[in-house]
Image: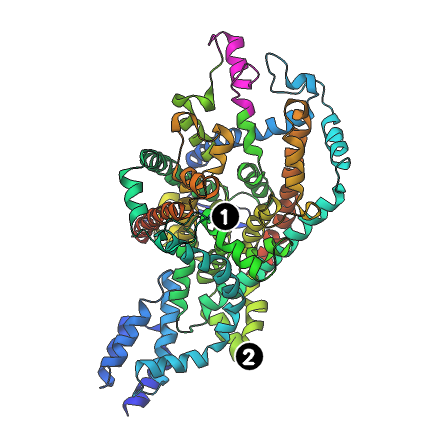
Amino acid sequence: MQKVQKMRIRNHQVVLNRSVGGDAGIFVFLAIMGFFMFLPMVYVIMQSLKPLDELFIFPPRFWVQKPTFGNFGSLFKLLSDSWVPFSRYIFNTVWITAAGVFGNLFFSSLAAYALSKIPFPGRVGIFKVIRSSLMFTATVTAIANFLTLSTIGLLDSHLAIIIPAWGSTLGLYLMKQFMDSSITDTVLESARLDGCSELKTFWVIAMPMVKPAWLTLIIYSFQGLWNAGASVYIYSEELKTLNYAIGQITSGGIARAGASAAGTVIMMIVPIAVFVISQSNIIETMGSSGMKD
Amino acid sequence: MANQEINKKAVDIRKISKEEFKEIYFKTSTETAVLASDLNANSTDTVVTTDADNDASSGKKEKKVVTARKDMTMAQWTIKEMKRNKVGYFMIAPFMLVFSLFTLFPVLLSFALSFTSFNMLEFNADMFVGIGNYTRLFFEDDIFLQACKNTLVFAMVTGPISYILSFLVAWFINELAPKVRALVTLVFYAPSFGGNAYLVWQTLFHDDANGWVNGTLLDLGLINEPILWFHDENYAMTLCIVVALWMSLGTAFLSFIAGLQTMDKSLFEAAAVDGIKNRWQELWYITLPQMKPQLLFGAITAITGSFGFGAVVTALCGFPSVNYSCHTIMHCLDDYGSTRWEVGYASAIATILFLIMIGANMLVQKIISKVGQ
């Protein structure tokens, strides 16, 4: 006689074969790991809340004694004193990030769908080239990119950062892997039989099925573009990014240690907010739109 | 007669396996030599698809072969397929245009430059040096060899650990409630996400008594003078590895979480009925095989991440690091590529790094193909 399987419901799903000991072990592992991961991040926040005298106290303390927002105040004061208005840097970064992320998402998904689901000759070779190119370091390609950008006249404009982001190979590779694994050909076939054009099939049928992959791509792409610093392709001061502006201020040494700590927190908070928002919007809708055939 | 039989079979082609199909097909048809090689060429095509997907797509292809004219040559068939699927070319066109301009062309140019002594200033006929750059790298450049050693040590420690850690954490938190899961994901992902938050390690492990670790150790009387941490040969590499691991739950981690959420859940119940005993068996036989595409993706990010971990080291240890203790291939590359502007030589370094990564990726692909067996 076979032993009766232990069944448990967890998070509205049937979860099988879970021992209590294993659960406890995993909990302990996650707790230790999480502590190790989170402690330095807490310290980042602590540093930004410490008044200047507390930053250089001996012995240094982990926790802040008299929390203050003075550091943020001095950061904003320094920023608003800059030659180019502070809001201009914010606009630059937001525009670069938004245009880059959405272009990247759309074009790489479109190409990934074709490479994954349309059997045109040559797609395997093309994909191999794309995948290999991921492993080439970008340092030495900067010269060729400079030549290309100057030939097509994109130097010293935001497009010099935005357009290359549209051809991000990692994004395409990610979308392709997800389309391979979570979209079955039968679903697409029935959509085509119903008279859906290929573009419509892609947008209406395929894309909703890989929502978690979007989230990953958006976050990954956002992270890179948001943190884009001084670019060699942009030399007008009024076109430069927020990260560059904050970097200029915080490189001022010990006197600006407080403003520097505040700057790190500011640059960190926005991506985290984006992460939280997209997490709730995309992951949470997954349960209702799960379209397995 | 034969044709009719094939067409009849073609209806339920999805239900039979590839081997069965070939048998039927070869029995009923006489002119199969060309098409058979055709079939094989196609079945090797789908390298990185899951098994289920592989069957489905090759089934579809074979059906096309059946309906295609038998007396077509390979070239004719290719052209027909190209016309039939031309929408595919339109869909990849925008991406391919940008990709060719900003990735493919620079990479190819760099390959070419690696055989020259191009240095941004001189354009002349005797720029071409053949494999001179490569022999110089391996026989004359001691710092490069030291960097190779450091890079391999660094990549062999951080690569596998970060990869396995990313997967395990993603897998462990998969069963948590969505809100809790999002929070835990954030905690683990924040270090690699938070811009230059890694600089906090410099504050924690600062050279002087102002650093939190030094200060605390001094205060407790465990040490008499501050340790130089990131500027001490004995500690620098280890600390960099710790920071790398701290930041390692990045894009691959997110793709694992996403992959676990798009899995076919009915398989788990079926597996339990079939006698899967514990979570580890479930992981090996059900979860991992379904996750292969994400595993391959994660492998690439782990490889590029661990071999290309240069900027963070520079920020923490300075450039060059003390006595080249943390000097990696990436640092050689930056040194020659953007400080000394010896672009030809830097291109040779980039090519070597590329080949190392390709090799590592092939190795990992081999290991992943063994999963679930």
At numbered mark 1, what does the secondary structure look like: helix, strand or loop?
helix
**Residue A16 magenta:** no
- Residue drawn 42% across the image and 36% down it: A22
Which disc, if any, is residue B99?
A: none
Q: Chain of mark 1?
A: B
Label 1 neighbour load within 10 Å: few <14, some 14-19, many 20+:
many
In this rendering, would B271 be left or right of A104?
left
Is residue B277 visible to the viewer in this orientation of the structure? no
**Three-letter amino acid code at the position of disc 2:** Asp
Q: Nearer the viewer, residue A202 or B290?
A: A202
**Three-letter amino acid code at the position of disc 1:** Ile
What whole-number distance in Å separates the C-alpha atoms at marks 1 and 2? 33 Å
Which residues, given as a range, are shown in magenta?
A: B203-225
Name the image quarter holding the N terminus of chain B: bottom left
**Residue B214 magenta:** yes
Figure check: A254 above or below B289: above
- The residue under label 2 is A194
Q: Position of residue A88 (x, y in %)?
A: 74, 46
- Residue drawn 48% across the image and 43% down it: B170
Q: Position of residue B13 (x, y in %)?
A: 36, 77
- The residue under label 1 is B257
Is residue B349 visible to the viewer in this orientation of the structure? yes
Label 2 neighbour load within 10 Å: few <14, some 14-19, many 20+:
few
| Residue A198 in which image quadrant | bottom right
Q: Chain of mark 2?
A: A
In this rendering, would B302 be left or right of A239?
left
- Residue drawn 26% across the image and 71% down it: B19
- Residue drawn 45% across the image and 56% down it: B106
Q: Position of residue A9 (x, y in %)?
A: 51, 47
| Residue A255 in which image quadrant | top right
